[in-house]
Amino acid sequence: MTGPFSSGFDSVPGQRAEFGELARQSGRMLNELSFAQIAGAENLFTKAMRALASGEADRAEQLIQRAAHMAYDAREAGSPGVRAATLLVYSLISDQFEACEVDDMSWLDVAIDVHPNLDPTGRAQVASVVHGFVLQGEFFDVSAVEKRRIHQTFDDAPLEPELGDGPNSTLEQRHDIIRSLVMAALALRDAYAAIADERGTRA
C-alpha cells in the first residue's frame, strides 16, 4: 500500500520522500567506504606478497597486520581485510580460468597441485573458489572432465566457506585468516607464473 509520503525506495513505509533519499545517500556512502577499505587491503596484500617474494617476512607481517586491524563490518557481514584476501585468491584462479583455452586445464592443474600444500584455511578457500565454478554453472563454462576432477578433489565444497571471520573474531584471528589466504595466493601466483615461464621457454 502507498500513501502520500511513501515510495518504493523508502526505508520505512510512509516516510517522507526526502528521508528515503537520505537513506539511499547513506547506503551509497557506506558502499563507497566498504569498497575503499577493500581496495586499501588489496594494496596492502600486493605489497605483502612482494615482500614475501623478496624474503622480507617481517615487512609482510606488518602489512597483513594493518589489514587485520580493519574491524568486522556488520552491514557487509565480513572484515574488509578478510574479504579482500578471499577476493585475491578468487581473482588469481578466475583470471586463469578465463584466460585458458577450452582444452587447457592448467588453471585447474595448478589449483589441484597447490591445494594439499596449504593450511586448512587456504585449502577451504581454494576449494570454494574452484567448486564455485561448478555451482555457478550459468556463469562459468566448465567442461565435463573439469567437473569430474573438481568433484574428485574438492567434493562439495561450499560457495562461502566458514573461515572464522565474524563479529566476535579477534585481531589475532583475522590476522591468521588473512595470512593463510595471502600465502595461498602467493603459492597460486608462483605456480601459474611457473607454467607461463615454461610455455614461454618452449615457444
Image (cartoon, rainbow, N blue to C red):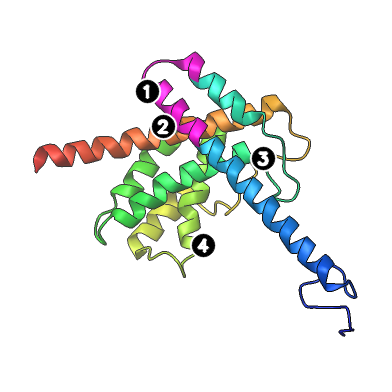
- What label does residue 79 carry, if any? 3
Q: Circle 3 — which element?
A: loop
What's under tag 2, amino acid-wise? Leu
- 54 left or right, relative to 151: left
Front residue (pair 103, 193): 193
Q: Earlier in the sequence, mark 1 or mark 2?
A: 1
Distance between the Cα atoms at labels 1 and 2? 8 Å
Residue denoted by label 4: 135
Residue at horizontal 56 percent and vertical 19 percent from the top: 62
Residue 80: x percent and y percent?
63, 40
Does the magenta portion include 86? no
Q: Residues within 10 Å of mark 1 (few under 14, many from 20)?
A: few
- What label does residue 53 carry, if any? 1
Q: Earlier in the sequence, mark 3 or mark 2?
A: 3
Residue 88: x percent and y percent?
48, 42
Residue denoted by label 2: 186
Highlighted range, magenta: 43-59
What's under tag 3, amino acid-wise? Ser
Magenta span dominant secondary structure: helix
Query: Seen from this angle, which residue lies furthest front?
Result: 18
Distance between the Cα atoms at labels 4 and 1? 34 Å
